[in-house]
Every structure is written in structure tokens, then in C-alpha cells.
Amino acid sequence: MTKEKIGSFTFVLHSHLPYVLSHGRWPHGMDWINEAAAETYIPLLNIFNRLISEGISPKVTIGLTPVLTEMLANDEFKAEFKSYLGQKLEAAGNDIAEFERLGQPHYAMVAKMWQDFYRNTYKDFIEKYNQNLVGAFAELQRNGHIEIITCGATHGYFPLLSQDISIQAQVKQAVSSYMRHYGRQPRGIWLPECAYRPRYEWTPPIDTGKNTKPYLRKGIEEFLSENKIEYFFIDSHLLKGGKAIGVYLDRFDALQELWSRFREQYKPLPEDTEKTPHNIYWVGPTVEGKMPVAVFSRDPKTGLQVWSGEHGYPGDPHYLDFHKKRFPGGLRYWQVTDTKADLADKTEYAPEKAFSRIPEQAGHFKDLVKATLAAHKKKAGSSGIVVSPYDAELFGHWWFEGPEWIYHTIKAFHNDGGIDMVTAGEYLDKSRPTHVVSIPEGSWGEGGYHWIWLNDLNQWTWKHIYESEEEMIKLAKKFCDKKDDALLQDILKQAARELLILQSSDWQFLISTRAARDYAEMRVVRHYDDFKRLAQLAWKKGKGEELSKEDLNFLDYCQKRDDIFPDIDIKWYKELEFKP
């Protein structure tokens, strides 16, 4: 007899990194993707396959952004990753020898743990996944065990982009890239930073020097509907008001300082007790011929239980501390100890003790989900869904034991039998929304609005993005149809790639958090400068002038460095497909 399900649950893991190939290695650049692949993507693949081997389908909804997918599929990443793993193995070997020489057996034991970790990761990458992590995720989706969702092509912050054509290009490139790598149309999307904007008369939030009058902008859901994307995710405060629960404030001291300047301006919307994050709703364009798009909302209780730096599981004193590293190898040997302890007070990491904490916390999470679903069913008279979205890199990279916690949590759901593990698309198929709602502008950042991505530290970046957006549209209108000029088309496509990378929301985030401020500012300047020069080359070539050897060398340099999105289409920038 099948146990009655009290409701449904899905993990939503958002995997993303900015484009870093050929843009530095350490401390900022290629090692970001190397670390994430070693500590998050391969461990997640391993626990998904481990669950499947035990007869449990993980049913995780996982986002792999187009820019991340392109990087993971690139041969440069594959070569760099193997080299990185070799360096880590060498570092572990050196640490073992030194700890043994100095009579520190406990640290030597942890170093051997790292040696095993990187040796097994190397073996899995080569033998189990054939150096094709994108293909490994795609196979899991083909077999119905996970659902892969997409995102803006380069994680551009949609509400702050100045041109609807820019959002159109971000979405169309996302769909094209997804179909090329995963062999089908994406059903769902993770809006970058969960940032949404409805249809209204919009004016640029910065002074562009042009005295721009308000102009009608399409709602974000309209771009999704036009491109056959069926659902997206928002933070719960956008659905029902109340206080926004930011996901990054606890992790970056610089954000806490910045937030103190914005806190007085923040006024939560009145809470709507009729709406619930445990139902899904239609967000419907009031435009004839466009299908509404479903929206899933983040469950605040399960979000805090993992994200909170003070109350979340990753803050358990026994777990591996993220911040304290041993140089030159960069391996970690200390436990959290206390979330408020400074680096000097961190104590020795004990792997067995750390991993022994996981089953209890997985059971606690399962009980929390079950109680939340039971309370919803009692109040609403029908079953609902708990949606728990997190940055995937939290699991393994930030929280070393995180993938194992996901394994035990999914297993706890399975063994309980009272919760239906589903992907978002599966839930939408069986529980179609019955209500259409309007949602306000906002994001999942602290305060629920745009301040992390638009403040006095980073507003200068938007001036250059806005200028480049307008220039790209002029170029596309003028030269898109000159298909017989292959060189001109190559220049236009590379200019569009530089614009897409320039639009990445990561740069503003890194500037605000000061986690890699110099690097982010350098990347903004580089892509802006290169876009400008490519635009000049396009105008020159379009007028029939010959390009110099140096001009051609520059184009070749950009094409090799920013080798991304081979299917980019300039017509996306020529005109808006459906005008507001």
C-alpha cells in the first residue's frame, strides 16, 4: 500500500560562475571554476549517481547557466582542471611529508584525506565522466532523475539593463545554448539574482546625461513566454510582501556595511496572507497571444535553515572552515569552531566527527519540510510544495560536507515516504496553477531590491553598459543583413559576446562585496574597451574600408580569449521581436 503524500518538495540548485577562461588563474579567474568543479559539480554528480544506484531518483532541479555550461564544455577548462588537480595532489603530498616530519599526525591525517579527495576527483573526471561534466548532467536529465533549468546567457541583471533588446538577447542565447548542449527546449529559468521587473514606463536609474524620458518596458515574464519558457523562481517577499530575507548578507562583511546605508530607505511591503509560497501561480502577460508563465516561490523557513550564517547547518562548529587555508597549497585543516571565532582561534578539523553530524541535520530538515507541508495542507485544504533554492556552490565549495548532506536529506525523504520528491517541471505538470498574480519589482538580495547591484560603489559600471547596449543595437540595425561580408559578421558577433560578458551581474556583486573588487572592475573596463574597439572596426568595415593587420590581430585575440556562444545571432539585436 502506497503511503499518502502530504505534499511535494524540490531542491533547486543554481550553478553559476562568470566567464573566467583566459582571464586570470589565481586568486581570481580559472581557479574559481576549478574549485567549483572539484568541490561542487563532481561531488553533486557523484551523490546523484550514488542515490540512483540505491534505487532513489534524486529529482533535483538544477540550474546550469549558459556561460557556465559553455566553460565546462570548453577544452581549455578540461586541460586547466587536470593541471589544477595535479597541483592540489602535489600540495597534499607536500603537507603530508611536512606534518609527519614535524610530528603532527592529526594534520597529516587530514592531508591524506585531501590527497584521497583530489585523487578520486581526478579519477572520476577522467574515467567516470569522460571529462564531460555537461554530458553527465545531460544524461541524468535524459533518464528523468534531474531537471536542468537555464538562466540569462551571462547572468545579466535583467531589471537594470536599459534595453529590452538586451534581455531578449540574453534569453534567446540561453535557449539556443541549452538546446545545443542538452538537446531539448528548457522548461524553466532561474532569473539572474531572482530579479524581476513588471511592465511599466521605465527610466534609467542613473544619470546618463541624455535627459531620457520614461519609456514602456516589457515585463520579464513576457520574454520567457515568447521563448516557450514555462516557469521561473522568486523570493517569497515578491509574492506575498513582508520582509525580504537576503541570502548573502551573512557571508560578506562588506555587504553588512553597505546595507547599513540602505536600511533606513527599506520599507517592507504589507504582507498578503492569502498568497503562499507553497502554491504556484501564473504571472500572466496582459498581452493577447502570450501564454502566462508559472512562478515558484522560495520557502523562507528551509532557506534560513541552510543559508543563515548563525542558525544554518553550515555553521556547525565541527564542519570544515572555509576561510582559513594553509599556504602555499591552500588546503584547509581547521573546523568552524565558532561562527564568530577569528582565524587564530580555529581548532583542528576532525572529518569523522564532522560527517557524523550530517544524518541528524538531514533528519531535522526533512521534519521541517514535513511540518511545513502539513501546516499548509491544514490551512489550505490541499497539498502544496516546498521549494528550497540555493546557490549550488554552497554545497561542497563553501560547505565542504554539503553534498553529503544533500545525499542524506534526499534519502531521508525517500525513506519517510510521505513527501513527493519532484522536479519543478514535474510538479507544474501535475499541479497547474489556478490563480494569476501580479508581482512587484525586486530580487532575492537583502532588502529585496537592486541595491547590491546598483550603489555608489558600482553605479559607474551601468553607464558603460548602457552606452554599449545602444551602440550594439545601432550596429545590428545597420549591418545585420550584410550576410555576404563574413568578416563584418565575425566582428559583430564578437562585439555581442563582449557585451554579454560586460552585462554579467557578477561584476557589480563582486564590487559590492569587495570579494574581488579590483578584478571585477578590471573586467568591466576590459570588456567595455574591447567592445568599443570592435564597434569601431565594424563601422570601418561596414563603410568598405580595409582593416589593418593590427585590427585583424585584435579580432583574433578577442575571439580566442572570449570563445563563447558560437551560435550567437546578431538579428537578436536588430529589433525587438514583440514590441510592448
Image (tube, rainbow, N blue to C red):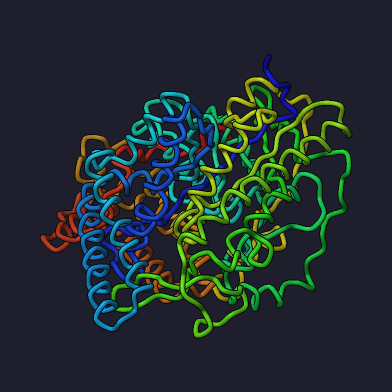
Q: Residue at x 29, y 73 (%)?
A: 329
Q: Nearer the viewer, residue 244 or 215?
A: 244
**Left or right side of 318 for 86:** left
Q: Residue at x 41, y 76 (%)?
A: 518
Of all residues, the one furthest to the top in this rendering is: 1
**Left or right side of 223 for 548:** left
**Quadrant of the rendering where the C terminus is positioned:** top right
* Residue 466 is at least partly visible in this image: no
Q: Position of residue 170 (x, y in %)?
A: 47, 44
Of all residues, the one furthest to the left in this rendering is: 549
Q: Residue at x 54, y 27 (%)?
A: 228
Q: Total of numbered circles in the picture?
A: 0
Q: Position of residue 360 (x, y in %)?
A: 63, 50
Quadrant in the picture for residue 565: top left
Considering only vertical position in the picture, is 397 above or below 121?
A: below
Q: Residue at x 54, y 38 (%)?
A: 189
Q: Position of residue 548 (x, y in %)?
A: 13, 60
Q: Nearer the viewer, residue 569 or 14?
A: 14
Q: Nearer the viewer, residue 503 or 348?
A: 348
Considering only vertical position in the picture, is 218 above or below 262?
A: above
**Quadrant of the rendering where the N terminus is positioned:** top right
Considering only vertical position in the picture, is 560 above or below 182?
A: below
Q: Position of residue 33 (x, y in %)?
A: 35, 57
